[in-house]
Amino acid sequence: MPDFDMLVIGSGPGGQKAAIAAAKLGRRVAVVDRPDMVGGVSIHTGTIPSKTLREAVLYLTGLTQRDLYGQSYRLKDDITVADLTARTQHVVGREVDVIRSQLSRNHVSLYAGTGRFVDPHTIALREVTGHERLLTAEHIVIATGTRPARPDSVEFDGRTIMDSDNVLALERVPRSMVIVGAGVIGMEYASMFAALGSKITVVEKRAGMLDMCDVEVIESLKYHLRDLAVTFRFGETVAAVERHARGTLTILESGKKIPADAVMYSAGRQGLTDELDLDKAGLTADPRGRITVDEHYRTEVPHIYAVGDVIGFPALAATSMEQGRSAAYHACGEPVGRMHNLQPIGIYTIPEISFVGRTEDQLTEDRVPFEVGISRYRELARGQIIGDSHGMLKLLVSPEDRTLLGVHCFGTGATELIHIGQSVMGCGGTVDYLVDAVFNYPTLAESYKVAALDATNRLRQIDRIGD
C-alpha cells in the first residue's frame, strides 16, 4: 500500500488547492516543497509581493491623488526600498501562515525539501540536511511552477542586471532602468518604477505590447506611462548589456546605446522541471521546461497530473488554483465541471487593466458584428471622488441577441469590476439586464449601467434607420 493517496510536488496556488481538495475528499495527502518556499513563487517572488509592492508605491507616491491635490503631491519624498519591502514582507509572512494553517487544518502532511522521481509512483525527498527518504503515492501532482528565463548571452548579477525575481531584493530605487520585454511582468514593473520617479526605457522586439488586450486600452496605458517619462523602443533587440562602474550600458542591434543604473530582463519563464528526473516516471518536458497535459490535467502517465505555470498558458495564479482542484477531483473519481472558458485576465500596471471575452480586433477577424458602449470614470461621481479621470469601461455587445461579447476595463479597481461583466456573460445575460439593474451610487460599478445605456442608444439608432 502506498504511503499516500496523493503526493503534490510544489505548494503554490495549483499544488495547494489540489492537496486541500483531495484532503476534503478524505484522501491521505502530502505536499513537498522547500522550507523557504511554502506558498510557491506566487507568494514569495511573483503575484503577492509584486502586487503588494504596487500598492505601497501607489500609497507612498500619492500618484493617484495628484488630480485632486496637484502634481507636486507626495506622501513621502525620499522613498527607500525599505519603505516598500516593509509592507511586502508583512503580507508575505501573513500569507505563508495562512497556507501552513490550511494544510495543517486539513491534515495534509508538509515535507520540507525537494522531490525527484525514482519511478512512476515513488518520489525521493531530499531534506534540508541532505538526507534522502522515499515517499510513495497512488497519484502524483506536479506543481513546481516556473523561474524567470535568462538568456545565455547576458551576465546576470542580481543587482544591476537582474530578472523579475531579483527586483524585490534591490538595495535602492534606481534613478534609471532599462526593462527588456514588454509582456505583463515587464509592464507591471515599468509602471511601478516610473511612478517612483525612475526614468524607464522599455525595449521590446515586437511592434507593440500586451497584444491580447484591447487596442484602445493599450493606447491609454502608453499615454499614461509616457506621461511618467517612460520611453518605448519597439521593434528593437538587445545586442549586449555592458556593466560599468557607473551603471549599465544597453546596446541595441540598431546601434542605439541606453545608459541606466539597472537592467531588468522580463524574457518569459522557464518550467522548474530539470531536477525532477521526469524520465524515471516516463515523462518529458519541452525546451521551456513545460509538461503537456490533457483536459483533466493528466500527463502521458495517467496517474501523474501537472497543474499551474509548469503546463504553460495562461500561467495565472487564478487559473492554477482551478486546475489544481480539477486535477484532484478527477484523480479521486469525483465529478468535476469543465473550467469555464470565460476566464478574466488582470494586469496590475498603473493604471490596472482587466478584461473578459473577446477584443474588437478578434471579433472583427471572426466576422462577428458588435456595438460598443463606453463609460468614462470622469463622468461618474465616484470617479471624481477618487480622483481617477482617465479610467474607462467598454462593453462589446451583439446586435443580434444583445449578449455581451467582451468587457474591457482600464483604471482604478479594474480587476475587481470585471467580475460583474464576467457573471453577466457566464449566465448568458444581455445588455438590457445592465440597463434595468440598479447599482449603488456613487460607485465605479455604475459604469456598467452608463456603458450599457451607451450601447443600447447606438443599437436603437441602427434600428431607427432600418425601420
Image: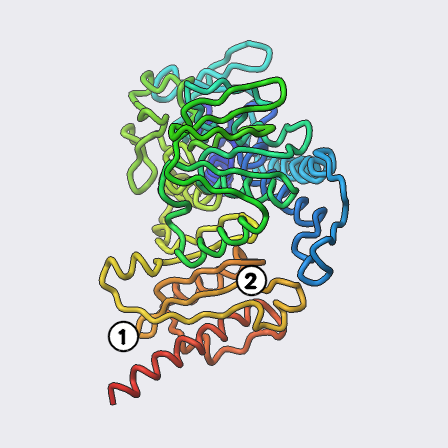
Tell which residue pokes out farthest to the left in this image.
Answer: 367
Tell whether label 1 touches label 2 (CB within 8 Å).
Answer: no
> Which quadrant would the C terminus be assigned to in this image?
bottom left
Three-letter residue code for mark 1: Glu
Nearer the viewer's eye, disc 2 or disc 1? 2
Left or right of 446, for residue 234:
left
Three-letter residue code for mark 2: His
Residue at x 27%, y 61% (from the top left corner): 364
Q: Which corner quadrant of the image does residue 302 belong to?
A: top left
Label 2 environment density (alpha carbons within 10 Å; few <14, some 14–19, many ≥20): some
Tell which residue pokes out farthest to the front in this image.
Answer: 255
Residue 189 position within the rendered picture, expressed as x and y whole percent measured from the top left: 55, 40
Disc number at residue 271? none
Residue 414 position within the rendered picture, expressed as x and y whole percent measured from the top left: 53, 58
Residue at x 45%, y 55% (from the top left corner): 219
Q: Nearer the viewer, residue 208 or 429?
A: 208
Work out whether mark 2 precedes mark 1 in sequence or the reverse, and give the earlier one: 2
Residue 162 visible (yes or no):
yes
Q: Secondary structure at mark 1?
A: loop
Measure how far apart labels 2 and 1 are at the Cα level: 31 Å
Q: What residue is shown with label 1?
A: 400
Residue at x 45%, y 57% (from the top left corner): 217
Q: What residue is shown with label 2?
A: 390
The image shows residue 48, relative to residue 346, as above or below, that is above
Q: Nearer the viewer, residue 247 or 428?
A: 247
Residue 26 visible (yes or no):
no
The image shows residue 464, relative to residue 183, as above or below, that is below
Residue 334 position within the rendered picture, expressed as x and y whole percent measured from the top left: 38, 45
Left or right of 301, for residue 433:
right
